[in-house]
Amino acid sequence: MSLIEPKIDVLLDQAENDRFLLCSVAAKRAHDINDMMRGQRNRAIQLEKAIDIAKSNNRRPLSLAFDEVAAGDVSFDPETIDVKNH
């Protein structure tokens, strides 16, 4: 039994079973969440839900990013690896 959630298998399924792609997508999304929490970036402002979750749970941006990837709420453009949030 794993104590880490979400499980790596679920995360890799969302990233074409490519661990480097998963790291890139999660890092870019965590960067957006971090910027959004600091109010520094217009691109991230559209996702106020993440701010509320972060404040209420005291969770770090990377943990939130992995949760969003596992839930399928984050996707990417295969050409540019540009992250999109649904």
Image (cartoon, helix red, strand yellow):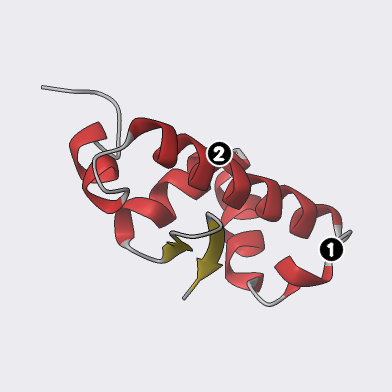
- Vertical comparison of 33 with 59: above or below: below
Left or right relative to 55: residue 21: left
Residue 57's x, y, as percent? 55, 47
Contact between marks 1 and 2 (CB within 8 A): the answer is: no
Q: Tell me the element at label 2.
A: helix
Is residue 33 in sight in this rendering? Answer: yes
- Vertical comparison of 55 with 84: above or below: above
The residue wearing badge 2 is 62
- Vertical comparison of 36 with 63: above or below: below
Is residue 59 in sight in this rendering? Answer: no
Q: Nearer the viewer, residue 51 or 28?
A: 28
> Which image quadrant is residue 66 in?
top left
Q: Label 1 vs label 2: CA separation?
A: 17 Å
> Which comes before the other along the chain, label 1 or label 2?
1
Residue 20's x, y, as percent? 42, 32
> Which image quadrant is residue 5 in?
top left
Left or right relative to 23: residue 5: left
Q: Nearer the viewer, residue 5 or 10?
A: 10
Quadrant containing the N terminus in the rendered view:
top left
Left or right relative to 1: residue 67: right
- Pointer 1 local density, CA inside 10 Å: few below 14, some 14–19, many at least 20: some
The residue wearing badge 1 is 41
**Type of residue at label 2?**
Leu
Residue 27's x, y, as percent? 58, 40
Task: Look at 52% across and 40% down and name the residue there.
Answer: 24
Task: Look at 52% across and 69% down and name the residue there.
Answer: 85
**Type of residue at label 1?**
Arg
